[in-house]
Image: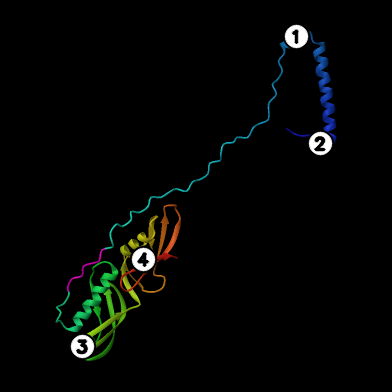
Amino acid sequence: MRLLTGERLRFGLAVFGVSALAVFLLTACSDTDPKSGSTPSASGPSVPSSAPIPTASTPTLKPLPRPTKPFPTPTVTGAPESDAPLANRIRFAIAKQTQVTAGKAAKTTVNCPGIDAADKPGNHTLKCTVTYAGKPFTGTLTVNAQPYNASYKFTSEQVAVVKEKVVDAVLRAVPDASNIACTMDLVAVVPSSGDGVRCDVTTTANAVVPHNARISGDGKILVAKA
């Protein structure tokens, strides 16, 4: 309905008065029964609908099944005899720890030039290349050899790890994960310090939350939000 204001209001009232008079005169002069005529029904104002406007809902995703057992420690075979040359025992020890850290048993070679002479009394520092499942990384081997006794230590700023183990660790740390996407190959060599492996976790609330999985030299994986 259009409202009239000011001069338009007075003009409207005047027109309304004339119209009413014309209708009155017309009715008075008519020979027909006023009751026989029909009067139009007044239409009321429109009432806005109170129905709520539908909105898009966020879908709820299903959570991934959580592991019920610890991630299996691989069984590494081929251990040398206790009286085998020191070089052979050191090579196997490095290869075994590499596979345990990675999470799967796989072909592993250890190449440390000069290791065959490391059983001579004294301190020895050697550079080594370890290749796990075709993925090489380097480290430092220190040997303290004494008559009838020797101690050794291998250190590296890198570790080999399989993707399955990383995903397992993230799933244990994020119980409402619906999907886990880690930026790595099935087998990868990653730094043992820093942020580690980046994994994007999609939660059951359909939110993507980035996480970092850092792998230590002893095979432990620390997962935290990025």
Q: Earlier in the sequence, mark 4 or mark 1?
A: 1
Viewer-side residue, 149 vs 58: 149
Number of numbered tags placed on the structure image: 4
Q: Identify the secondary structure beneath mark 2.
A: loop
Per the rendered image, the range of residues in magenta is 72-78
Residue tagged 3? 119
Percent of width and height locating residue 47: 64, 32
State how far apart marks 1 and 3 are (Cα). 133 Å
Residue tagged 1? 33
Secondary structure predominantly adopted by residues drawn in magenta:
loop
Q: Earlier in the sequence, mark 3 or mark 4?
A: 3
Q: Is residue 74 magenta?
A: yes
Judge whether 129 appears above or below 38 on screen. Answer: below
Q: Earlier in the sequence, mark 2 or mark 3?
A: 2
Q: Identify the secondary structure beneath mark 3.
A: loop
Q: Identify the secondary structure beneath mark 1.
A: loop
Judge whether 8 appears above or below 151 on screen. Answer: above
Q: Earlier in the sequence, mark 1 or mark 3?
A: 1
Q: Nearer the viewer, mark 1 or mark 3?
A: 3
State how far apart marks 2 and 3 are (Cα). 110 Å
Residue tagged 2? 5
